[in-house]
Amino acid sequence: MTLRREVGEIEIEVTCAEKLWACPECGQRMHAHGWEQRRWRHLDSCQFKTFVVASVPRVRCEGHGTQRVRVPWAEVRSRFTMRFERLAIDVLKECSGKAACALLRIRWDEADGIKQRAIERGLRRRTERPVRRLCIDEKAVGWGHRYVTIVSCADGGSARVLAMEDDREERSLSRFWRRLTKEQRAGVETVAMDMWEAYRNSTLRYVPEAEGKIVYDNFHLARYLNRAVDEVRRREHFQMHLVGKDTLKGTRQFWLYGVENVPRKWASRFRELRQAATQTARAWKVKELFRSFWRCRDETDALSFFRDWCREAMATRLEPVKAVVLLFKKHWTNIVTYFRHHLSNAPAEGINRRIQQLIQKACGYRNRERFKRDVLFHLGGLDLYPEFVQ
């Protein structure tokens, strides 16, 4: 061991004493053909940068040519020991690249190399295990109407990202389905998505018996109702404004509240609004009534509730509300499947929120492919760590 105090480094020299060496590709043992001096960064010792130095033998294999023997403390073509890479991966997962470089005292390209090797390692190890419960959602990235399709798996514990595809077209999701084996597609039990027709068509094309497996997300159904309530509010506000009343001006947020979530300081004003704005109040009541739909016991109970709710909604004679009723009736087959599978897009929405945090931490991404690989690194549920050689 050599201490180089002037540069703050410690070098640990390792001597290879074996006579026969194995080809890293086929394992055939043979004598060394030559030697090469190499140096690997290791975990720091007493705040000193620590390096492992060794002369590594080369072997000449008949089938694979000249190969450098693999050492037990580092991966092939890596300038870092496995223990250092494990530490670097943990640090990179917790903070930004710039901060990780400062803590580890390495360059940005070195940190990025560790991250890219970890992603490749994780993708190779991702076995073709069944994917049973999937969530499909889109996320806006960059400026303008630019999207990526995110497919996540909600099996077991926390959701993990399986794939990110450019755009939100039918072919975007089809690229993911084609990468799965026939057995994996047959093993899909349920798929949660919004009412985007492109996703539905792609799923119907590639997943066997998909009609009974697609579940439309309850959050997106609630969003349609909220839009209908706001449309009714706008129309009623226009009518009231013509006679000099601005009661509904600036009240959009009130009508988004659930009855139990109205802030106490606004409760009395909201009661007065419901008495003054009769059309908006009727639409809001229908919206609130539909929230009880998800507490039905089973599909039969849900069908009975839905029929009663439809009569109540149509009786309002409000065109935006009636349009939502017709939309729900059209897609009833994939709404009621919720009571069979009990899956929503909540895991996908959680992943979207974490992706947004990644974007903020990185101060944005200029490169789409790097963005997708970073998502896989942090949210892909991959086995990123190097495997120690015994």
Image (spheres, rainbow, N blue to C red):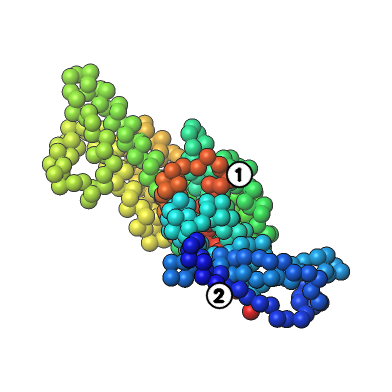
Residue 325 on image: x %, y %: 40, 40
- Side of 389 where 24 appears, left or right: right
The Cα–Cα distance between marks 2 and 1, rounded to whole angstroms, is 55 Å
In percent of the image, x 81 and y 77: which residue is there?
30
- Residue 62 sits in which quadrant? bottom right
Q: Amino acid at mark 1?
A: Ser
In percent of the image, x 56 and y 65: which residue is there?
41
| Residue located beneath label 1 in the image | 172
Residue 204 on image: x %, y %: 61, 49
| Residue located beneath label 2 in the image | 1
Residue 50 on image: x %, y %: 52, 68
Give the quarter of the figure containing the N terminus: bottom right
Residue 108 on image: x %, y %: 52, 51
Q: Is residue 360 visible?
A: yes
Q: Amino acid at mark 2?
A: Met
Q: Secondary structure at mark 2?
A: loop
Q: Is residue 1 above or below residue 273?
A: below
In percent of the image, x 33 and y 50: which residue is there?
291
Q: Residues within 10 Å of mark 1 (few under 14, many from 20)?
A: some
Q: Secondary structure at mark 1?
A: helix
